[in-house]
């Protein structure tokens, strides 16, 4: 097992309170299932005349991450039309399109209607946004969080434009406030909802990014948590000022300090601080939950592992240290050495996992399967989401373009299931 520093007396009150809970197992996300459960309204016979002026509406539906209900009205029943979305990010064009057969009501409702062809494969009101495609090898996660406009246009099958509208996307908006924590001497970003009431304690998150380093990716996730009502502290462990430039022998003291700082803040329930990590940050989140169960209320391990892996890119050094001591690591993702395994039985809180079957960074679903098996054997609370056709980055809370070559629409579908599982595990705010 991974070497554990002294932690003092461990609190078991939370585990006792959860003893009546049943173990929750793998939840698989598939486009086919969603398609099978959805009916479309197609007409028969000759196309009818348009039912009125063609218009596109995009109205907030109250869902997480500023989701919209998108409808096209005034279309001719039985006609064939194409809905297109276009935007520019990092000075590069991104496009998405899908074809529809208009139903008897002369309306296309993206939450209801199945495309006959195109970039997405299931009814979803946000599909035009999360299927935007372009030169994804040049796309950075941060770009989708910059304010940008997306044009929606509906055309006839022959390319004649019928109507268009522009939708402004601003992730921060008026819902979240983000600031650095001056009391901490490492890169941070503290995201809180604008309605945050320090008099009412609520769950909070420590958020860690992956092998990209820095704090930008973690900040994007922290903003997502804040938009859902959870205060979240993003912490950078390397590639920051005074920090290692590579993921090699990186001290984990900043992560522990971040947890301790969160527990002292007004409005945060100190018994409900959970660690979140994406990719290589996932193993750190699990390590924190297992090593400091009296401080950390479980872990969210997104496309990550439950064993400690070695350095990036060469794997010739330990990736992490604590108290000046390297954590035992493995370079064998298929058969990790016993000493690299994190003691899941020590976790006092929920464990939420996610993987994508189209993950091209590493086989996150094989890693997840091993973690589920070990968690079930340890008898701890575990929930997992398998994103069919989803990429390594589907857990980022954005409706922006796919950042990897995933199955069309798969990232968006898997993302919704993942964040639903996260909210269920964290509980109400």
Image: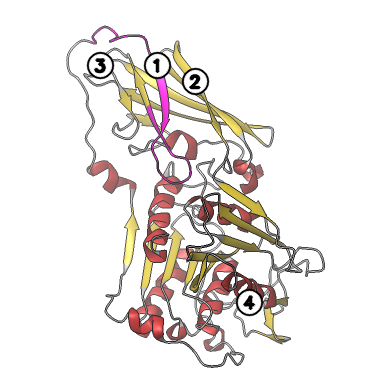
Query: What separation in Å lies between label 4 and label 1 (alpha carbons)?
Result: 53 Å
Residue at the disc numbered 3: 78
Instruction: State which tag comes first along the sequence, 2 or 1.
Output: 1
**Which range of residues does the magenta coloring cover?**
47-70
Q: Is residue 395 left or right of residue 137?
A: left
Residue at the disc numbered 1: 55
Residue at the disc numbered 2: 165
Which residue is at the front of the view, 55 or 14? Answer: 14
Q: How is the image coloured?
A: secondary structure
Which residue is at the front of the view, 357 or 378? Answer: 378
Instruction: State which tag comes first along the sequence, 4 or 2.
Output: 2
Residue at the disc numbered 4: 256
**Depicted 154 relative to depicted 314: above or below:** above
Foreground disc of the pair 4, 3: 4
Residue 52 is a magenta residue: yes
Instruction: State which tag comes first along the sequence, 2 or 3.
Output: 3
**Depicted 55 relative to depicted 59: above or below:** above
**Depicted 158 relative to depicted 388: above or below:** above
Mark 2 touches mark 1? (CB < 8 Å) = yes
Where residue 131 appears, as percent x and y from the top left, is 48, 38
Foreground disc of the pair 4, 2: 4
What residue is shown at x 42% (from left), y 65% (from top)? 426
Q: How crowded is mark 2: few (under 14 residues within 10 Å), some or many (20 or more)?
A: some
Where residue 421 appears, as percent x and y from the top left, is 38, 60
User: Can residue 307 be seen in the rendering of this structure?
Assistant: no
Query: What separation in Å lies between label 1 and label 3 (alpha carbons)?
Result: 17 Å
């Amino acid at each position: 097992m991974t070497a554990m520093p002294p932690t003092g007396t461990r609190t078991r009150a939370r585990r006792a309170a959860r003893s009546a809970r049943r173990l929750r197992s793998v939840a698989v996300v598939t486009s086919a299932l969603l398609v099978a459960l959805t009916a479309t309204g197609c007409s028969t016979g000759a196309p009818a005349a348009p039912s009125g002026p063609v218009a596109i509406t995009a109205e907030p539906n109250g869902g997480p991450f500023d989701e919209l209900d998108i409808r096209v009205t005034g279309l001719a029943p039985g006609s064939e039309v194409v809905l297109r979305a276009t935007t520019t990010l990092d000075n590069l064009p991104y496009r998405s399109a899908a074809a529809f057969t208009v139903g008897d009501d002369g309306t296309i409702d993206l939450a209801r209607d199945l495309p006959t062809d195109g970039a997405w494969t299931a009814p979803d009101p946000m599909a035009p946004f999360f299927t935007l495609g372009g030169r994804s090898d040049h796309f950075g996660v941060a770009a989708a969080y910059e304010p940008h406009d997306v044009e929606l246009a509906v055309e006839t099958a022959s390319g004649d434009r019928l109507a268009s509208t522009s939708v402004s996307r601003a992730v921060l908006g008026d819902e979240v406030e983000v600031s650095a924590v001056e009391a901490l001497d490492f890169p941070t970003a503290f995201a809180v909802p604008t309605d945050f009431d320090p008099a009412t304690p609520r769950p909070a998150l420590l958020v860690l990014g992956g092998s990209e380093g820095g704090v930008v990716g973690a900040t994007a996730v922290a903003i997502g948590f804040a938009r859902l009502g959870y205060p979240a502290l993003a912490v950078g462990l390397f590639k920051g000022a005074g920090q290692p430039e590579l993921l090699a022998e990186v001290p984990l003291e900043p992560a522990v300090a971040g947890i301790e700082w969160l527990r002292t803040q007004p409005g945060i329930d100190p018994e409900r601080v959970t660690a979140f990590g994406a990719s290589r940050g996932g193993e750190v989140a699990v390590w924190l939950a297992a090593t400091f169960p009296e401080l950390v209320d479980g872990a969210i391990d997104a496309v990550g592992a439950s064993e400690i892996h070695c350095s990036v890119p060469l794997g010739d050094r330990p990736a992490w240290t604590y108290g000046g001591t390297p954590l035992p690591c493995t370079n064998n993702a298929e058969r990790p050495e016993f000493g690299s395994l994190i003691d899941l039985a020590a976790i006092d809180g929920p464990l939420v996992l996610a993987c994508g079957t189209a993950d091209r960074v590493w086989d996150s679903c094989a890693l997840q399967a091993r973690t589920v098996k070990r968690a079930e054997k340890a008898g701890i609370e575990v929930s997992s989401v398998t994103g069919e056709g989803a990429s390594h980055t589907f857990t980022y809370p954005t409706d922006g373009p796919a950042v990897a070559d995933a199955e069309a629409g798969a990232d968006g579908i898997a993302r919704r299931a993942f964040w639903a599982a996260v909210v269920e595990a964290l509980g109400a705010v």
